[in-house]
Amino acid sequence: MHRRGSGFLLTLAITFMLAFTGCLGKSSGNGGNGGVQTVSLNPNQTISIDVGGTQVFTAAGKDANGHTVLGVNIQFVVVSGSPNSSSPLSIASNGNACAGTWDASVSICSPGTSGIALVTAVIEGVSSPPTTVYVHQHINSLQISNAESQSPQYDCFSQGQTWQFEATAYSGNPPVDITSSVGPIDWASNPPGVVTTSTYVPPNEPNVLNQIQTTAAAPGITQLYASVSGTTSAPIAFTTCLIQSIYLQIANQGQAGNSITVNNGESVTITATAVDTLYKKANVTPLVKPPLTWSTTNPEIAAFATITNTTATNTATARSNIGGATLTASCTPPSCNIGVLPSLPIYASDCLPTSSTAPCELPNGTAGYGTISVDVTLPTGSTEPVYTAWAATTDCQNQPGCASALFAVKPGTNPIGSIVALPRTPNSMMFNHQSTARLYFGTNQGLMYVNVGGASPSAALVSSSPTPCNVSLCGTVLTISNDGKLVVVSDTVSTPSQVYIYNGSSSGVAPVDLIIPGETATAAAFSPDQLKLFILTNAGNMYVYSTVDALSSFSPIATSVTNVIFSADGSFGYVAGTPGATSVSGFATCDTPTTNVLSGVTTKAVPLVLYPSPTFQLDSQGDWTQIVVALDPPYVDTFGVNVAQVPLPYNQFACTPPSVSPNLSYSTSSNLGQGDFTPIYSQLVNDGTEMIVVAQGSPNVFIFNVSNGTTTSVGLNDPLGGNSVPLAASASTDGTQVYVAACDQYKGTTCSAGSVHIICTSSCTTGQGDYQQVPYANINQDNNPNMCNGQGAGAPLCLPNLIAIQPK
């Protein structure tokens, strides 16, 4: 170890400097506000330069008000850091310094000797703090080595563990150690966050300036560098032990289980125990500050206000909406398991004290879980929330000058509320479920949105110009991330086809543009932690996008893939249509390219939509079974999927996909009795116990009971005496209220009248059955019934065919 230096001489030199500069100036200011009170020297503190090198010094004086005093005379003073010896640095009156001596013209610097110099600036008798200059022979290499008396026992450090390193500077050939002459060493790491560093001076050895103490911080791998005088060392790898497992518990509930029922508006606090790859092996404790990402499968039901923290605990609030959600936590890059490529997320897992396949590793021996199921209900005596839906129309058909109307509708004597003009024809609409206020619209001219929570809502355009599409974001809205920030748009207008990812949380972030030549994205889903985006195309392929990894593909999957949605813990995504036309598969989230982890699930017909239930069963072996409902007209199939997380082995920097297998004991198939129908809307509601289905051409809302396989229906009342035909629908999260935009009268093949049907599927406080039909009437335009404005007299009637319930 290099523990020699010039610290003692430097201390003497500073004392000498203070005495010397006292003859020229003083550190205290002159009297009067107009005079120089303080002097600053740049560079300040410490610098290191080669023998024969040059450096420019500047100085400024400020008055008592902090204003720079102009027109002053600056005197630069340099003394040797070694008393009774000549200084290794000379400085001209203009501040140009030479590590040696200047010629008469102050243009050629002749090299001098190594040593230490102290530089100050004096203005009107006021001195600056000194800058220490280390002059040394040229550094040919800088090398990092261990500064401890022993070697590390393992090749990673647990969070909070400290270790000392040192850097050695060499000059010439053969190399000569010149560490003591180069001064303090600078240290840095990349990527940041894995380790923190602080200057380390060994006890009773003040001359040692080349050492640091590192402290393991966030799990991950980084490169540690040393640098001085323009020379940077070769990096050494520093690893803060990766997170191996995460176990969740409901706060203050302990072993009571992994599910809880709360009233809407209440909160659920979750605690997490995160252990690294040395846990048990090296008798280390769980992480005190685990950098976790907290996720919900249904932000309409329960959501975390802050989705990342290092406190090992977080609280989710149950919203006013009724139903079920699953909460979980993960170690998600880039804030956790930093610098591991491909990215290495770790998802929470179960551990049971009595299990042989999922042995519990919690310090107190209690059970831990991979997910927490939350059932949000109404308080006793309370009534269901009354919802507002927003209806729009596609009937402008992109005609120039045609403004589509968007209107709010709710039960009551004045059902129509705000009316908003949409300057572009929407083709899709979707609420940001994390926020109750923002409603996104996909259009062929570009993405737009309306913040419907304001007093006078209006449409906002991502780009005022409809071209180019990669700026305006033309296309159909496919999905929105659970944190509400990212919106995925499939461009069906441009060639080649593209997928845009718009960040609605920050105006300064440019959209991501993914080019998928020859294919059109038809479905997409974010993992609950927002790390991965699975994209399905009309060619039967799947693409995986990540903020950490490059775009990858899994192809071909099938002739047609129809739907993708993630499991409760986020560790894999269910995909309908793989590997055959009537089956379901699962693809791991943690690896790139993704691994198919589920096979052997076959439905009776082509599965169009998959709905994983927010509730699940946990067996004695630590495996949980998630019930999945598949809509495959004319059937509804249910099946179980067993999932077990496999802990990350010590020193493994690659994904270990979850163990996933079908649980056929939960498999059922029910015929809705409607023949082969085309659904225009379906949704799993009421904590996963029911599914709402609205079919094309059928004047009914179907309620499928998941537990017993039975189906009931509520018919649409036709206010005009015919058969109302649904055009679009949206259901509340508890399934009690369904809003159906329908055509109520046809003239030939043209719909001539329509309304929004407000339906209560059970005994609601607002009504029963299809108790109110609301035809569009523009209350701002003499109750004009046409939702298309600007087309003149006699224009075809435009009616609502897009609808979405605003979350509470």
Image (tube, grey):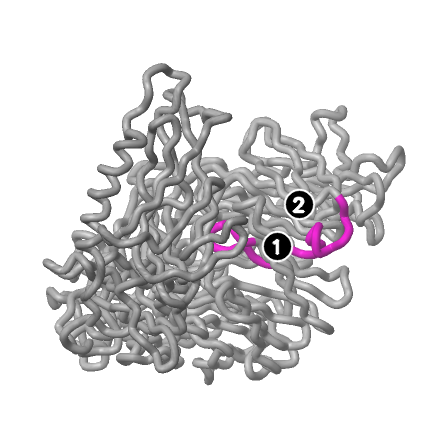
Q: Nearer the viewer, mark 1 or mark 2?
A: 1
Which quadrant of the structure image shows residue 210? bottom left
Residue 54 vs residue 168: left or right?
right
Q: Which residues are magenta?
A: 465-486
Amino acid identity at mark 1: Pro
**Residue drawn where x is 35% and y is 82% of the image:** 174
Q: Residue furthest top?
A: 32
Where is mark 1, residue-wise?
A: 511
Q: Nearer the viewer, residue 779 or 124?
A: 124
Kindly check if marks 1 and 2 are in contact, taking CB atoms under 8 A apart as contact. yes
- Alpha carbon distance from label 1 to label 2: 10 Å
Verify whether residue 485 appears in magenta.
yes
Q: Is residue 694 above or below residue 384?
A: below
Whether residue 234 is visible: no
Mark 1 or mark 2: name the one nearer the start of the chain. 2
The location of residue 466, given as percent across then percent down, is: 76, 48
Q: Which element carries disc 2, helix, strand or loop?
A: loop
Which x, y percent locates residue 626? 37, 69
Q: 389 or 251, which is in the foreground?
A: 251
Amino acid under disc 2:
Val
Is the residue 482 above or below the residue 402 in the image?
below
Q: Which labelled disc corresponds to residue 462? A: 2
